[in-house]
Image (tube, rainbow, N blue to C red):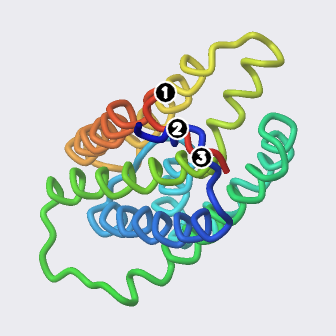
Amino acid sequence: MIEDNKHRQHSLIEDALALITATPLVALGVTFYSHAELLTGSTAGLAFLIKYLTEWGFGPVFFVLNLPFYLLAFLRMGWKFTLRTFCAVGLVSLFAELTPQWVSFHQLSPVYAALLGGMCMGLGMLMLFRHRASLGGVNILALYLQDRFNISAGKFQMSVDLVIVLAALLVLPVDKVLLSIAGAAILNLILTLNHKPGRYQGVS
């Protein structure tokens, strides 16, 4: 008989390994996007917009933008999720600043950057989700508004991303915005195909 492992508890070491594997992968995607001057949605998208407008580093901006959301994370998801998310955001912020010092591009196709960057971020986020962590920000707020005020989390998230895309048109050329949308589609496709209810239910 095959043992049912759907609800097997993740160990602390497994959670830690997931964090230190997923966050450099997300940061590599961020590096692709930064070099090609692309952006994604949610809080990371806001961080990209501020970076392009001010020349501030993505990492510090991303870290600061997430600070107001940890109380909501604690209320909505509990302290373990909040702690793992804080660590994930901190590591992505750190690796986003360090990766360009470790990796340089003499030639990088914007199409390749959009698609591979989206894949890297999608795979990293998938790993974090499976270990009960996230990259914080807008999706936590969306879940809170849904619980507190019955506002659809999906519609709220979509509205925020739409505003980010429209704002990006003021900063980036249209072709870069279209490539960013394609990258976001790849990212969300990875999550949609692989993060389904009942498919993987490891517990942290």
Which residue type carries mark 1?
Answer: Gly
User: How far apart in space, not on screen, are marks 1 and 2 (Cα)?
Assistant: 8 Å
Q: Which residue is mark 3?
A: 8
Residue at (58, 77) in percent of width and height: 94
**Residue 74, relative to residue 146: is it above or below?**
below
Residue type at the position of mark 2? Lys
Q: In the image as oriented, which residue stretches furthest toward the bottom?
A: 101
**Residue beneath disc 1:** 198
**x 53%, y 53%: residue:** 128
Q: Are marks 1 and 2 in contact (CB under 8 Å)?
A: yes
Question: In which image quadrant can residue 15 be found?
Answer: bottom right
Local crowd size for mark 2, using a 10 Å CA cut-off: few (<14), some (14–19), many (≥20)? few
Residue drawn at the location 86% of the way across and 45% of the way down: 71
Residue flagged by tag 3: what amino acid is it?
Answer: Arg
Question: At which x and y percent is residue 77?
Answer: 77, 39
**Alpha carbon separation for disc pair 3 and 1:** 13 Å
Rendering coords of residue 59 (x, y %)? 57, 70
The numbered mark, 3 or 1, whose residue comes first in the sequence reads 3
Residue contact between numbered discs 3 and 2, judged by CB atoms under 8 Å: yes
Q: Residues within 10 Å of mark 3 (few under 14, many from 20)?
A: few
Relative to 79, 146 lies left or right: left
Q: In the rendered view, would you say 192 is above or below 151?
A: below
The residue indicated by pointer 2 is 6
Q: What secondary structure is found at the residue carrying circle 3?
A: loop
